[in-house]
Image (spheres, rainbow, N blue to C red):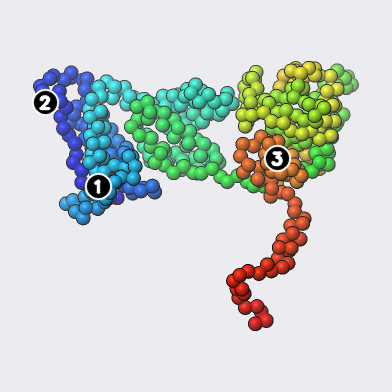
Amino acid sequence: MNLCKILVLQRTDSWQAVGMPRPASAIAPTSEVTGLVRIEDRAKGRVWIAEYRRADRKKVRKTLGLAWVRDSGARTPRGAIVWRAGAGPKPADHYLTPKEAERALEDLLHEERRRPRREVERQGRRTIEDVIAAWLEHSRTVKGVTPATYRSYESVGKSLREALGPRALARSLSVGDVKRLQREMLDAGRARATVHHQLTSLRRALEIAFKAGWIDGNVADEVEIVPLPKVEPDFNVLEPSQVELVAEAIATVPESELPRMRNGEVWEDVAEKVRTTRLLWSEVIRIAAYTGLRIGELRALWWVDVDWSGAALRVARNAPVTAPVGNTPKAPKSGKARSVPLIPQALDSLRRVSHLGHATGPGDLVFPSLGGGLFDGGRVRTAFYEGLETAGFEHLRTKPNPMTFHDLRHTFGTIAARVFPLADVQAYLGHSDISTTMRYAHHVPRTDAARLLATGFASDRGGAGGPIGRSPAQ
């Protein structure tokens, strides 16, 4: 680590110089506030680091900016480099010369000396509980996260409070504490994605605390957080005939599963509701595979969204399964409405749904629960997995990368990519980035690829440079 020779600043404030009295506990003692600046090498270049001690004896490190310096050739008694300003004009204003770094430190120390002791003591008492609460409130009010996202944040906050101690002082949290938390989570077998999410959430929470003046630096910024695992490029796809087999398996209710009365006879009124529900679920599976809608978009689909004459489906709302009961559907994940073409199989499926006896007004749900509300996403998923097993595809659920309900969306994307340009598939699926859609390009069979490539190697166009090397005959 390179050091620069900078004076430790311990000057008195002006009110002392003119002999004005200082309230006993109002202003931080000047003698306790000291500091220095040093240069450290970072990936982005040399930077100025201020190190100072606050009035409450807390040591603080703060990055001041990039350093515009050069080696003067002189050394301190301890062998550290004495830096001079770099040659020529600075590349940008945020680069600091040694004198500018000194002034920046002096400003920090002056501000710290002028802080009332009561404020120092009050801010220093903020706990991890306070930090997490502030982060959650900021997420809810400023960021405006969805109820489902907020609930997930609450879960993260609970884990962080338990791990760090809710009453622990926020200013006592160190870089080592954050590193230790990450290591313990990984050693406990927590998924890397979970560890990444929790540590980045802690970093955001500490950033809010820092901006509020509760802490003097975000120690999580100094920790290399484990990256998110790479997305598995492979996924499961059903062919259209397989989709039909699974849907039929879901629609078929075995006699053994029908509700019965005490005398053993089938309770027909209830059994009819069971059959209707299973038929509805089977059509949910078909529409998911034939349109690529997410499960939340299927839950929020209205009959007004079905364009029978234009053979298209408008996707304008989303009701995530993680949202609280009674929550109002929101815009699709991309934030924009989209239109998806309806193939004959999808149109037939929707016609069957319209004859199941549910309300079919413009504002009625296409796939309602028995009570007329949003269907239970968990029960539909379970029905899909049972349908896979009944249809003879149980191996798709037991392999290392098991099939999920979301793979029905991948089914649509993969089959659509066989006949449409990827830009069209992107629009149908509502992807904001074409790179997300590109995953389906790897699943498009190119049986003519070898033949087309062979034509490219079939003849030599030649060139002005003549022969490049010897032929085997030479």
Question: Where, by quadrant of the figure, is residue 320 drawn?
Answer: top right
Q: Amino acid at mark 2?
A: Ala
- Counting residues from the N terminus, which is met first, the one under dot 2 or under dot 1? 2
Q: In the image, residue 465 lies at what x, y percent?
A: 59, 71
Viewer-nearest residue: 20 or 168: 20
- Counting residues from the N terminus, which is met first, the one under dot 3 or under dot 2? 2
Going 85% across and 27% down the picture, which residue do you hit?
A: 352
Identify residue for label 1: 85
Distance from disc 2 to disc 1, alpha carbons, whole Å, reads 33 Å
Distance from disc 1 to disc 3, alpha carbons, whole Å, reads 56 Å
171 relative to 74, above or below: above
- Counting residues from the N terminus, which is met first, the one under dot 1 or under dot 3? 1
Location of the C terminus (image quadrant): bottom right
Left or right: residue 58 versus residue 208 is left
- Dot 1, crowdedness within 10 Å: few (<14), some or many (≥20)? some
SS class of the residue under badge 1?
A: strand
- Dot 3, crowdedness within 10 Å: few (<14), some or many (≥20)? many
Q: Which mark is residue 17?
A: 2
SS class of the residue under badge 2?
A: helix
Q: Which mark is residue 213?
A: none
| Residue 360 appears in the picture as rendered | yes
Going 18% across and 51% down the picture, which residue do you hit?
A: 76
Q: Which mark is residue 425?
A: 3
Going 80% across and 25% down the picture, which residue do you hit?
A: 277
Task: Please identify, in this view, whether the residue under mark 3 or under mark 2 is nearer the observer.
Answer: 3
Distance from disc 3 to disc 2, alpha carbons, whole Å, reads 74 Å
Q: Count the marks: how many?
A: 3
- Dot 2, crowdedness within 10 Å: few (<14), some or many (≥20)? few
